[in-house]
Image: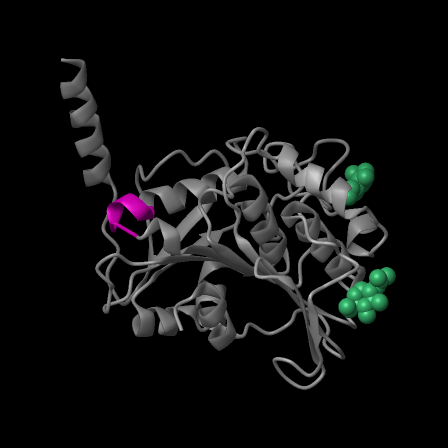
Amino acid sequence: MRLFFCLLALLGSMLATAAPTPGQFSQVTGSWGSNPTNTGFYIYVPKNLASKPGIIVAIHYCTGTAQAYYQSTPYAQLAEQYGFIVIYPSSPYSGTCWDVSSQAALTHNGGGDSNSIANMVTWTTSQYNADTSKVFVTGSSSGAMMTNVMAATYPELFNAAVVYSGVAAGCFYSASGQADAWNSTCAQGNVDATPQAWASIVKNMYPGYSGSRPRMQIYHGSIDTTLYPENYNETCKEWAGVFGYTYTAPQQVETNTPQSQYTTTIWGSNLHGIFATGVGHTVPVNGARDMQWFGFA
Ligand SMILES: *[C@@H]1O[C@H](CO)[C@@H](O)[C@H](O)[C@H]1NC(C)=O
Ligand SMILES: *[C@@H]1O[C@H](CO)[C@@H](O)[C@H](O)[C@H]1NC(C)=O
């Protein structure tokens, strides 16, 4: 009897969720899962959908929207080429930054925006029989901050991440517990922690987790006056600490890579940093390089 009602409830929730139209930027409405912060759920399912597709979560910047990020990034076109699905979450706050400051957001299943976004991934994975080893996250600015937070709070969901001009996960922490708070100390590059301290901040976001963690690629511009370039160093320190790399002794430094004025630092296969000299806020999305980092190309 109980099973029957469970099945009925499941059927009801499936019916209540309108199927997105392939080849069109669509909103997913209805009961796709728990959405504690009422985050908007938009999706691009390609016409050329792979049979076991990958998923890229692409997270917009402050003042941006899911639609603006869909239009200004190459992921939907790349989805048609490679057959993956793109999830575009949309911030529920006025000003459309992401909550990367509250304890809820900075905790696995804590009930913040990160929790809502994770539930979008879970729904999409089951709905489209996605390949759980090909789930990725990326974003710009506030979306890049959230990318670091997603990697820290839901490491089990993601294989790799690309961060375009964000801050380390936990750097925007609000001492008063405010959601969607701006943290000027962090933004202006005045938070300085050791790799070990950052690593314990990340590990405390999902206590007890000991599984694999997403490979991280970190971009930042040298003349960023919104999120000062020190945030590049702190983010690289954070993930170096998590992966057990010696921050001060990277494996390799390649100048003018992947383009003139960009320097790529490789700590190991799980952490690449790309510092863009002369670039402000934000470093432009490099779709072709992302496809390589995610393993599609
Ligand atoms: C800003 O974040 C840092 C940690 O990165 C924290 O120590 C500080 O208290 C935060 N500032 C505010 C106003 O909450
Ligand atoms: C931060 O990283 C950049 C790029 O690798 C480097 O030039 C700079 O010296 C670093 N800053 C500090 C304070 O370590």
Q: Nearer the viewer, residue 215 or 262?
A: 215
**Relative to 149, is 162 above or below?**
below
Q: Where does residue 12 sit, x and y in percent of width and height?
A: 19, 32
Q: Quadrant of ligand 1?
A: top right
- Where residue 199 sits in the image (x, y, percent)? 69, 42
- Residue drawn at 80 percent across, 46 percent down: 194
Q: From the viewer's perspective, is 98 left or right of 31?
A: right
The count of marks equals 0
Residue 84 placement: quadrant: bottom left
**In the rendered image, which quarter contains the C terminus?**
bottom left
Which of the pair 214/250 is nearer the observer? Answer: 250
x, y (%) of residue 220? Answer: 69, 67
Magenta span has 91? no
Instruction: Give the magenta-colored segment's residue range.
Output: 124-130
Left or right, residue 268 beside residue 50: right
Residue drawn 64% across and 80% down?
257
